[in-house]
Image (cartoon, rainbow, N blue to C red):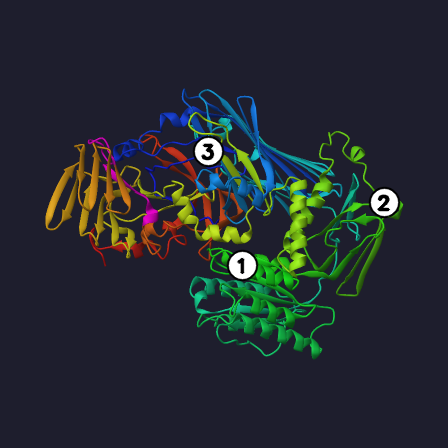
Amino acid sequence: MSGLLGVRVLLLWSCFCLWSGLASGALVISRDDEEPQDSRRSARSLQKRSTNEMMVEVHSVIVDCTVTSRFAHTVMTSKALNKANVPQEIFFEVELPKTAFITNFSMEIENRFYVGEIKEKEKAKKQYEKAVSSGQTAGLVKASGRKMEKFSVSVNIAAESNVTFILTYEELLQRKLGLYEVLTRVKPKSLVQEFKIVTNIYEPQGLSSVDAHATFLSNDLLPLVEKTVSDKKAHISFSPTTDQQRKCPGCDGTLIDGDFIIKYDVNREKNLGDIQIVNGYFVHFFAPPVLPRVPKNVVFVIDRSGSMSGTKMQQTREAMLAILKDLDEEDHFALVPFDSVTEVWKESLTKATKQNVSDAMNYIRTIDARGSTGMTSGVLRGIDMLKKGRQENRLPERSTDMIILLTDGMPDGGSSYVQSNVGSAMGEKMSLYCLGFGNDVDYNFLDVMSRENRGMARRIYEASDATLQLQGFYEEVASPLLLDVDLRYPDNAVDFLTTNNFVQLFNGSEIVVAGRLTDNNLDNFLVEVLGQGSEGDYKVKGQASALDWTAMYPNDEYIFGDFIERLWAYLTIQQSLEKSKTGESDVKANATAKALEMSLDYHFVTPLTSMVVTKPETENKTGEPLIANKLTEAQRQMAEKMGMISQLSSGVLLSSIVDGDPHFMIELPDRHDALCFNINDKPGTIFNLVSDPESGIVVHGQIIGDKKISPDGTMNTYFGSFGIIHQTLGVRLEVNTQEMSVFQDNKQVKLLWSDTAAVKGLNMDLLVTKDRSLTVTLKDSVKFVIVLHKVWAKHPYHRDYLGFYTVDSHLLSPSVHGLLGQFYHGIEYEVTGLRPGEHPDKPDATMYVKGRELNVTRGWQRDFSRDVKNGERVPCWFIHSNGTGLIDGDASDYIVSSLFTTD
């Protein structure tokens, strides 16, 4: 799912967060705290943490990853103790790459093991149909962002008992832009006695580069990443002590929160590639060291229908401008925008000279969204231009033809109609790459159509970094090195071969072929690679030989001896699943049957299998069956469409707070990160915080300043009063540091902070906790809590001030806006280029958000929700200059004339 899910928008100093066992990459253990039974209990929870919350002690969180010749085997283990004298529900949640297959899950509770069993999906579904229909069975796997899936399970643990969770998954690392990536997401949420990430990489080709970093690494944590690299092995570990995990001395919060990323590449000295043989199976990695690029002839077919209006079209234009700049002068290109009418920039493909590129960029700037879609005619026009260019000999003989289709819509005339017309027109040489923009696109259709035409599909997420996503995809296919690549092996020596014919090899990628040996006489194992390069035919031959792993790694106990067989199985299943989507019905059926059989044989959770986990029996109910499934991309897309609904139904509250000087913080649990900014203005200024035109709810806040300027020349500002308006219900509420006033039907009700009171009305309920908080519940709508910060009355400079936060912000409409409201439904961004900042503990980085590039600083804000006096430090990316670039427009755009204006 996208980063929009599970968003908390916090404007600090005082905030209240509900955590119910969120974990990522490494493991998180937590208990299932009950929701407050009444508003008074909710208010009390602002000041102190629940006593029971500390009754789960996490002994260990260990992530152990072994990468052997690109095949990664990861085991995640966590052990926790229920210290309470009553049973508790303990959660285990892990995020794993969506390209990985789960192979095992087990729980050890009171010396008894509960192990997941992998079954055919349909049989598992039927077997537990009764539990599913009664609502007892829950899915254990959900989409999580663009790259990850979340595996979660909870179990009831007896008083003073231990539980150990173990999850294992495997994947073949893909080389992209010249690097392999091992991604581990870690979010312990509490201090861990034994926290450890260990990765061992074994690459017989030799390692050319190894880099390790994490999104949560401060200058203090950076030295704890230990990296030992020899010629053919790398060992990376990260194991901070409990004190090193702390956000601050003496506090319980942890710094460990984010992604731990290892990127590496191997030496490439052989034109034949690298062939490894272990236990009767072989794998062939092919990515020659130096080859000149093959010129490409590319037609960009761009959807400009009405649904692309606004941000999508702007981001498409920005991406195309960058892509055009990257074209090589030997390339030829064309631009075909389409809606209900198909147009072309020029009637034929044009060489990518500087002048032609400049002219094309000027044309791109004029493309705007309009009309309905006409995808078929757009793609067919691009095909016709490529064919005509070939027929007229205006394109290089040794070059590759490709169409890149960008669309956010559905196929016109139905998917079968479009696929049939496009497939018959493309012939045998062109490749079709489809980019599906947003959640409304029929991604499954694009995926099938691209695979049928020697290409691939990619989802472009509707987010602020869509421009970068488009550019990133283009970089992957920008430099073809070989065409029509054919890897050949002796027919009498191998069987069960994975795909060994490829349309092209791109710079920075890698071709992988695996198979089973039928002849142990390796003298007969001759390998040949054929292809077409820019300067002539490519042809290399060589003799394969088995590696002596014991001699290569004499100091390591090699325990992953079947890795090539499992690599072969993983690759075969992936390719069979792809074949099951295309071709004739019998071909699809055979591919599906093969993928299912191997998934069961090798214990992989794939789209055709399920892992069934039966929870232990309790006093109140029998063992509860749970099912873990593998999500397809179409299922992930559907999950994102319904993600906000499912997130809310699971009990996660979206909260938003403004407090302090004033400090704003946007917390995004799904991204394991937070963004911060300050708003500074003179006392008396009134800002719009929330404005929802559909519900009629408006919230304004007025700034107050210190009593006088302090000796150091500074004056702090705060929010001193709030105005809440519900236009539909005809209710107004004014809150300042002395009192609260409710206005309705020409009547006024006044309450004082010095009282404890509860007022129930037809349209609004109020609960005042003396000198502490006010809870405002609007009928059938959102809930607000306002916190009073009392300052010593005789303080020479400071004065009382207020904090404000929102509960159930999902009840406001998607059109909600304001300094707070614009973040209620989330924000997408990317942070790269970590570098030293002005302060040694606060590194700088580059953030891409809302189509902008910002310099941000890793800093800290204080969260006073649990400790009103001292607060708790929270790490976040700080956006400078009043949030410029992050908030829509300028801070001054949110200034209003009065607390109750609705203009």
Residue type at the position of mark 1? Tyr
Q: Quadrant of residue 896?
A: bottom left
Q: CA distance from mark 3 to mark 2?
A: 53 Å
Q: Residues within 10 Å of mark 3 (few under 14, many from 20)?
A: many
Q: Find the distance from the CA under tag 3 to the CA under tag 1.
A: 35 Å
- Camera-side residue of 273 and 138: 138
Q: What span is colored magenta in the figure?
A: 788-811
> In this orientation, does residue 375 appear?
yes
Residue 321 spot, x, y in % from top left:
54, 66
Secondary structure under the numbered disc 3 in the rendered image: loop
Residue that badge 1 annotates: 443
Residue 80 in percent (x, y) is at: 50, 26
Q: Is disc 2 surrounded by few (<14), some (14 to 19) or many (20+) residues within 10 Å? A: some
Amino acid type, callout 2: Asp
> Which residue was labeled with disc 3?
189
The residue wearing badge 2 is 519
Q: Residue at x 45, y 35 (%)?
A: 21
Q: Position of residue 695 (x, y in %)?
A: 27, 54
Q: Is residue 63 magenta?
A: no
Q: CA distance from mark 2 to mark 1?
A: 43 Å
